[in-house]
Amino acid sequence: MDNQLILYAVPLSGIIALLYALFKAGWVSKQDSGTQEMATIAGHIADGAVAFLKREYKVLVIFVISVAVLLGFANSGRPDSSPIIAVSFIVGAICSGLAGYFGMKVATKANVRTTHAAREGLSRALNVAFSGGLVMGLSVVGLGILGLSTLFIIYNNQFSEINQVINLISGFSLGASSIALFARVGGGIYTKAADVGADLAGKVYEGIPEDDPRNPATIADNVGDNVGDVAGMGADLFESYVGSIIGTMVLGAAFVPVFDSMGISPIAGVILPLVIAAVGIIVSILGSFFVKVKEGGNPQTGLNTGEFGASFIMAVLSYFIITNILPSTWTVSGVTYTSLNVFFAVIIGLAAGVLIGLITEYYCSTHHKPVVNIAYQSVTGSATNIIAGLGTGMMSTGLPIIVLSAAIIGSHYFAGLYGIAIAALGMLSVTGIQLAVDAYGPISDNAGGIAEMSKLPPEVRERTDKLDAVGNTTAAIGKGFAIGSAALTALALFAAFRQQAGVESIDISKPVIMAGLLLGAMLPFVFSALAMGAVGRAARDMITEVGRQFNEIPGLREGTTPAEFAHCVDISTKAAIREMILPGTLGVLVPVVVGFVSKDMLGGLLAGVTSSGVLLAIFQSNAGGAWDNAKKRIEGNIEFDGVTYGKGTEAHKAAVVGDTVGDPFKDTSGPSLNILMKLIAVVALVIAPLI
């Protein structure tokens, strides 16, 4: 088939994804929402989530319009660019926001329906929760590939230079990255302020569960699961997905010569990432049919079967895609490459993604040694729990970095810098099902909260807790995929920036480059500090408010008077909107300022932020995931030295403290760092023609 015809078929996969997401959303809506009390609680959660997104998006609209005007002005009158890049920026921002909104709307419907399904059995509950997550996953990949491929087709017909076309659609990635950073940071601050407040005020200070209906922070906590772990995460992976495609397209323009039977653009190496992503959507839908669990079985097995099965199918199909789109052999700068070389690079990316996922599962799963060791250290108090968690997080960086390093070297050996970029795309080719598995977690967490607040029988909460514990592991695996692909994508974007800006090499013996390297290495730490500090300040306000209500509302402790949930929701909302501005702006302004000082310094900055950002992101995400599951391991009763430890024991209280420390690690600062790395790289790429 002609490459031109293949390109025009790509948007169809995005439409299929959105139609199937609409079908699954309708199916979820038709499921029973349970009792009136359950429906009322779910209504409060949904209202709070929508209210937060509306307030957040009002702020982001101002930001998007301002940046779009600056982009249009900066690129007007330039022969190698056009003010149309501002349109790409706006479209990317809108698609990113819509992906998060659609996913969150369905998640707030799926949570209560998962609770009701858990009254009937584990298998049905998994089906509802995963279906809700699948809507999120397919919305992200559907909007991403539809928006990106449509813009490419329009621009390719309007402009003759392929490099100009790619430069214009890089605005789409910039829009997605900007929204993703604000959404991830804002949502992360919201959810962890509420979660930390609910945990400490409830479990530690008042001696009641975090999801007890007497706890005023419960609704805010459950709202946070949706705005942070669903909408924020959706925007996060939307940006990862789009960034990896565009990074590969930029390098593909120089890597593969024109190859079209009619002698017409587009270039084969440019459309290949679009086609791989399009096929990945169909494979993700197929993989979703393998996600099943028998009653009493392990949900992790069903989720892994779907996710890793999809990766295997994608590996097989990649061979036929690549060998049909690329020429069998070609030569670039005196080096001969083959289509098989590129196929091997994709396989390396897929394998690296699976390996990083398995390594993450080992460090974060409730059944493996690292988490059990943290639980054991909790017996002697909070200090030893925190020391063990920090050590586990640090140790967990070793194997993923070795895998990433091997993937970089291997993919570069087969296909140069294009190989590194295509390996990143290989990791994210089945993002649809990866994100579905990831989004399933917060839906299950919400389901458990609703079960507790509705005072359903204990066996219902046991089933939702089983789903939730697996959800913590799948969330950690999803973050591992995102961080690994972020490293490869940032490296590919870095190479694209050097090509566009004319930076020959990054020689750290030059003072200006070393200065940029150090500034870049510092940024993830300052960024994390801002995010962590924001969570701490908001959590303090939350704890104060919970204490005030227990002290001032007669009958609240006894459960005869309802809590004032709206006050806690308002605290998290205001804190998130206020505190997301500075870290979000930091990621956009710093590369612009440094770039106009020196393009070489900006190259050093990109190298520094990627190196320290990857390590810090893995450390924080895995430490937080391990702390969380150590707490859950104790809550499920665990025996050490002949003594059983469970809820209410001193070991449990220590584990709660560790989990509280890890919450902003794994859900605020940690996952935001992969966006920071790529946002800075995309900003550098966009301003490259200007410097």
Image: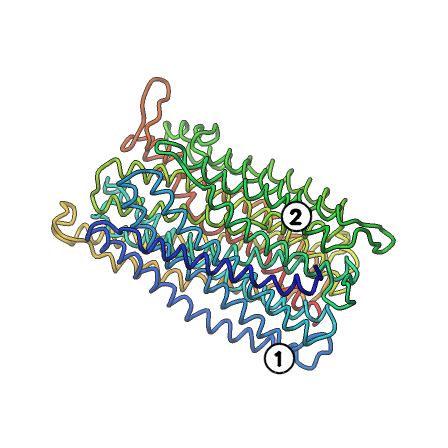
Q: Mark 1, mark 2: which one is toward the viewer?
A: 2
Q: Going 58% across and 40% down the picture, which residue do you hit?
A: 354
Q: Quadrant of the C terminus?
A: bottom right
Residue 543 vs residue 502: left or right?
left
Instruction: Give the amino acid type for the residue marked by disc 2 in the picture.
Output: Ser
Residue at image location 60% in from the left, 70% down from the top: 151
| Residue designated by label 2 | 318
Give the label on residue 465, or none: none
* For residue 514, above or below residue 469: below
Res. 73 mark:
1
Secondary structure beneath disc 2?
helix
- Number of on-image labels: 2
Residue ranking furthest to the top: 642
Few, some or many C-alpha atoms within 10 Å of disc 1 (few <14, some 14-19, many ≥20)? few
Q: Position of residue 56 (x, y in %)?
A: 41, 66
Quadrant of the rendered structure where residue 103 is?
bottom left
Instruction: Residue at 46%, 64% (x, y): give it.
Output: 97
Q: Which amino acid type corresponds to the residue marked 1 in the rendered image? A: Phe
Answer whether labels 1 and 2 touch (C-beta < 8 Å).
Answer: no
Q: Position of residue 143 (x, y in %)?
A: 51, 62
Residue 160 shown left or right of residue 117 in the figure: right
- Between 630 and 352, the one nearer to me in the picture: 352
Q: Position of residue 576 (x, y in %)?
A: 39, 60
Q: Of marks 1 and 2, which one's residue comes earlier in the chain?
A: 1
